[in-house]
Amino acid sequence: MASPAVAYARENQQRFLNELKDLLRIPSVSTTPEHKSDVQRAAEFVANDLRRIGMENVEIIHGKGHPLIYADWLHAAGKPTVLCYAHYDVQPPDPLDEWVSAPFEPTERNNNLYARGAVDDKGQLWLELKAIESLFKGHGGTLPINVKFILEGEEEVGGESIADYIRKQKAKLKADFALVCDTELFAPDLPTLCVGLRGLVYTEIEAVGPKTDLHSGMYGGAAPNPFFALIEIISKLKDAKGKVLIPGFYSKVKAPTAAELKAWKRLPFKEEHYRKTEVGSKVLTGEPGYSVLYRTWARPTLEVHGMPGGFTGEGAKTVIPARAKAKVSMRLVPNQNPDDILKRYKAFVKKLTPKGIETNIKVWSTGRACVVDTNNKYVKAATEALHEVFKKDTVFIRSGGSIPIVTDFQDVLRIPSVMMGFGLPDDNLHAPNEKFHIPNFYRGIESICLFFETLGR
Amino acid sequence: MASPAVAYARENQQRFLNELKDLLRIPSVSTTPEHKSDVQRAAEFVANDLRRIGMENVEIIHGKGHPLIYADWLHAAGKPTVLCYAHYDVQPPDPLDEWVSAPFEPTERNNNLYARGAVDDKGQLWLELKAIESLFKGHGGTLPINVKFILEGEEEVGGESIADYIRKQKAKLKADFALVCDTELFAPDLPTLCVGLRGLVYTEIEAVGPKTDLHSGMYGGAAPNPFFALIEIISKLKDAKGKVLIPGFYSKVKAPTAAELKAWKRLPFKEEHYRKTEVGSKVLTGEPGYSVLYRTWARPTLEVHGMPGGFTGEGAKTVIPARAKAKVSMRLVPNQNPDDILKRYKAFVKKLTPKGIETNIKVWSTGRACVVDTNNKYVKAATEALHEVFKKDTVFIRSGGSIPIVTDFQDVLRIPSVMMGFGLPDDNLHAPNEKFHIPNFYRGIESICLFFETLGR
């Protein structure tokens, strides 16, 4: 291997891993106020290392929530600029008694490093930093491309700080593309880039009937029941086979290319295994004629998440509630416009609202789907780098979820994201015994070194 | 008026009212543990008066909850036996700041007595006792019929003590009919007997889908959603017009007689007033072709009371829950058998359950509808007595609710209940400023005196 950066990374693997362990020992749980100073401490740990390895303008940005970290190095004239993203906060470790080793005492077993945040996302944040350190060392104190970092401490709580900052600091964060290290390999040893995310429209329908809660004995048969109204409405939003019935809902849907669909078929995906081990239901559901990956990655859906209101305690209470609510969301795919979908949805809900009931719709969030062109030069360079490390062709996958920061990079900064992640499907994200397969930590560092070297050429 | 009992009652009105005030001063709120000794105190107050007026075998029966009170006088050989029921516990007085006078300081205004429990049900309990006292006094220390009392202190908390006791003490409580004073007049000055109650089957459907809560982004389109399953199922249990779609649901329904329906039409009921002031919705709902009174009194219904599960907090959480529940009840009318209806309901829910979902049904309660034959001699005697007091014909109404004790009297003791109540529709039961119209307290005493004298002849 001709890369001096990779050579340096290999020589320093053990130190890099030890540093990551130090970062993992800081319980930077963003969801609970008692860890606020730990989150702050983790931010300082990261900022100090950014300074130490040679990044400039390192800044801890305090706002309403947990701090952001910015840094840059912009002396590669004429070369592309990357905006590196990751997050240094973690999920709570509960339930504690299911951990084999303590969540904030990083422990190696079977070539895995066990700790809360090992892979989500401190390990992947650290591999970004260590790639940059290796590049600095291998290139005589310079980098092959321009690099900016924007790191956050609120990802696990859905904090707004980073989105606000991006909107206010478009010039400062200007870049040609973003590198997001917060995803995973589709299967062990299979280099993977995520190139598509679904969008989201999340709403809450409130149905209002009687002026006050009524006794269902006295009034049942005369008083409109908001729960029944919601049931009537929602039952007509989607049919039993999973087809959304909102008029025009599918009219703009852009299907994946034939090449993409063909590639998905080659992925090592076993539907029966997925049903048993991941979903755990008797059968899978969804639109007939589409594969599971197609349905969850590239078809829009409509789901109900909860129906607050009325009596939800133990036992029986015979109430016709004055009001009830339903949390209903839609996942969107490329070319569906959230505003357009929302308009159609609202009109249809109004139309379906039975007499005697008033419905009001609150919108909790909207975001477009993202799709990254696999022919863009950043993706191409990334696949070359991954091939050199893994000795395999990269697979392009999508995710059915939404990563709000990627949508913001696309919609606000107008840059594509390279979602290059090194986790494994069984790494126990958000669960006890979270781990990072140590060879993947090293592969991640080397892949980024080679990726940026390629772009610098 | 030839009744010596009524003459005595009239002479003692003020004392009877003062005694009631003493009873009302005891805050026998059965719903909160801190009033446990007050409930006990109220039981003793009532038991002492039962002894004082001449009842025998007076007994305070302690069990798991608040005590029952039993008493009898069984020396009217060859005459019918009545089982008098009422309850001495009350609802909490909250919200306190809406009371014009303190809830446990009985106060007279405009010929009304204001206090928590004034009409529900201490006032109506006390008029039963004062009628018996007047009968003893007017009949030389004897009663015209045999009398048993069973009084409870758990009505407002749905306590099981009385139901358990009835099942265990069938012989002790044997009677020809029950007198239940816990209802109201249909309109002021209109003597009213309630002769029908709807039955109830209250269930909870649990729908189980994935083995664990799933992210709706990752799994939406493949994983079955228990909420959507419940929505699909329940939307097919009842149509938009209010017709229940469970096969055979209406097959046994016994319609009211033509005479009963005709009588209901003559009742002073204004649908528009009811819609505006009681229900407060834009329109009323329910099966076309049936009046409001018919729909709420004599047609079976199906309602949803709450749908626990999933995410019900503020904001957005994109979860496909592993399980969700729906509280669904049916009100039944005469000749519908709860077991038969439950069987049909369970089978239909199973049939409607979509693939990938498992449904389990828990039954919280079942009870048959009650209907009292208006030609039975107890009802006839009651109407005669009411006519003498009110100088008007009695109206026979039903209630859409269920009174479990009446169902137990019917199903366990096999006796009909005369539901003779003297409250008014605006007496603020369970609300601030509960009141009892004082003339109705006296009319109640006199009506029972005449009722029992008639039966003793």
Image (tube, coloured by chain):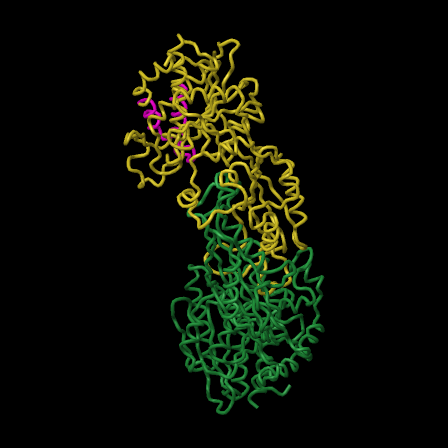
Chain colours: A green, B yellow
Region of the chain picked out in magenta, as a range: B18-47
Q: Position of residue A120 (x, y in %)?
A: 55, 67
Question: Which quarter of the image is occupied by the N terminus of chain B?
Answer: top left
Indicate yes or no whether the magenta region holds residue B29: yes
On screen, residue B271 versus residue A111, left or right, reads left
Indicate yes or no whether the magenta region holds residue A259: no
Q: Which residue occupies the foreground of this view, A276 or B237?
A: B237
Q: Position of residue B171 (x, y in %)?
A: 57, 18
For the stretch drawn in magenta, what is the main secondary structure?
A: helix
Which residue lies at the image location 51% right of the left edge and 16% below the top edge? B81
Q: Which residue occupies the foreground of this view, B138 or A75?
A: B138
Q: Is residue B448 above or below residue A448?
A: above
Q: Position of residue A431 (x, y in %)?
A: 57, 60
Q: Is residue A321 above or below residue B174?
A: below
Which residue lies at the image location 62% right of the left edge and 82% below the top edge? A385
One can see residue A7 in this view? no
Which residue lies at the image location 56% right of the left edge and 31% below the top edge? B257
One can see residue A153 in this view? yes
Locate residue A48: give its quadrant. bottom left
Locate residue B413: give its quadrant. top right
